[in-house]
Image (cartoon, helix red, strand yellow):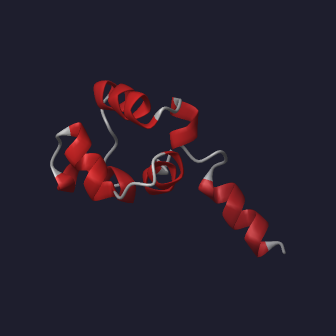
Amino acid sequence: MKIKLKETVKIKKGWSLYKLAKVLNLPQQTVYSWASGRTQPSYENMDRLCETLGCNIGDLFEAEPVQQKLDFAVNQ
């Protein structure tokens, strides 16, 4: 599953990923890695994200698989 961190941070707080990294006291590279999909946050960090952003885990992930979106786009 792809995390939609950048969009959620902007909607919920109006922050950049850089500011989120500073608030969470994490390396900027870690947060950017989550946002790009290279890595996923640990359960502990997922809880911290949700608490900091005031959201639930479902808000952080794509609602539908990417393949469904691609299939839909091709069939249009």
Give the farthest residue toward the right. Answer: 76
Of all residues shown, which one is farthest toward the front?
14
Residue 71, how many percent across, how many down? 73, 64
Quadrant of the frame with the C terminus: bottom right
Residue 37 appears in the rendering:
no
- Taking the image as shown, residue 73 lies to the left or right of residue 57, namely right
Q: Position of residue 72 (x, y in %)?
A: 78, 65
Residue drawn at the location 35% of the way across and 58% of the way down? 16
Which residue is pictured at 61% across the width and 56% down the height? 66
The quarter of the picture where residue 28 lies is bottom left
Does the rendering let one see residue 67?
Answer: yes
Asked if residue 39 is positioned above or below residue 25 in the image, the reply reads below
Residue drawn at x 37%, y 25% as measured from the top left = 47
Relative placement, left or right, of 64 versus 38 is right
Q: Nearer the viewer, residue 67 or 10?
A: 10
Figure check: 35 above or below 73: above
Residue 75 image-quadrant placement:
bottom right
Q: Residue 50 occupies which quadrant of the picture?
A: top left
Q: Is residue 26 left or right of residue 34?
A: left
Question: Is 17 or 33 nearer to us in this picture?
Answer: 17
Left or right: residue 51 compared with residue 4: left
Count of residue discs: 0
The image position of residue 26, as x and y in percent, is: 17, 43
Position in image of residue 9 (x %, y %):
44, 49
